[in-house]
């Protein structure tokens, strides 16, 4: 074998050894803490009335456009 093939084989073996070492020596994952569960009811069922235009519209009783 010439020098190029020996270097290529050595590089492949080193990469393979590093990959195997990483696989076996990685830390174990921490236990996942369960999150708080939420209810399944509709989120907009009890929606507060936050639209200021409904309370501040002075032309609510007018049926035609006053600016025409």
Image (cartoon, rainbow, N blue to C red):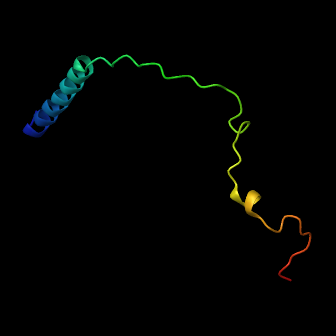
- Residue 4 quadrant: top left
The percent position of residue 49, horizontal first and vertical second, equals 71, 47
Which quadrant, please, contains the C terminus? bottom right
**Which residue occupies the foreground of this view, 45 or 54?**
54
Q: Residue at x 83, y 81 (%)?
A: 67
The residue that appears at 70% across and 28% down in the rendered structure is 41
Measured from the top left, where is residue 47 in percent x and y?
70, 41
Q: Nearer the viewer, residue 16 or 50?
A: 50
Residue furthest right as drawn? 63
18 displayed left or right of 49: left
In the displayed structure, 54 sits above or below 1; it is below
Is 6 displayed left or right of 64 in the figure?
left
The extreme left residue here reads 3
Q: Residue at x 16, y 36 (%)?
A: 8
Spot occupied by residue 19 in the image (x, y as percentages of width and height): 24, 26
Q: Residue furthest bottom?
A: 68
Left or right: 31 with respect to 1?
right
Location of residue 26 (image quadrant): top left
Quadrant occupied by the N terminus: top left
Going by the image, does 42 lie left or right of 66?
left
Q: How many numbered dots are placed on residues in this image?
A: 0
Q: Nearer the viewer, residue 3 or 17?
A: 17
């Amino acid at each position: 074998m010439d020098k190029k093939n020996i270097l290529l084989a050595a590089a492949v073996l080193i990469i393979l050894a590093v990959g195997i070492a990483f696989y076996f020596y990685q830390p174990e994952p921490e236990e996942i803490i369960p999150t708080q569960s939420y209810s399944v009811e509709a989120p907009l069922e009890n929606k507060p009335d936050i639209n200021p235009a409904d309370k501040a519209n002075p032309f609510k009783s007018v049926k035609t456009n006053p600016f025409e």
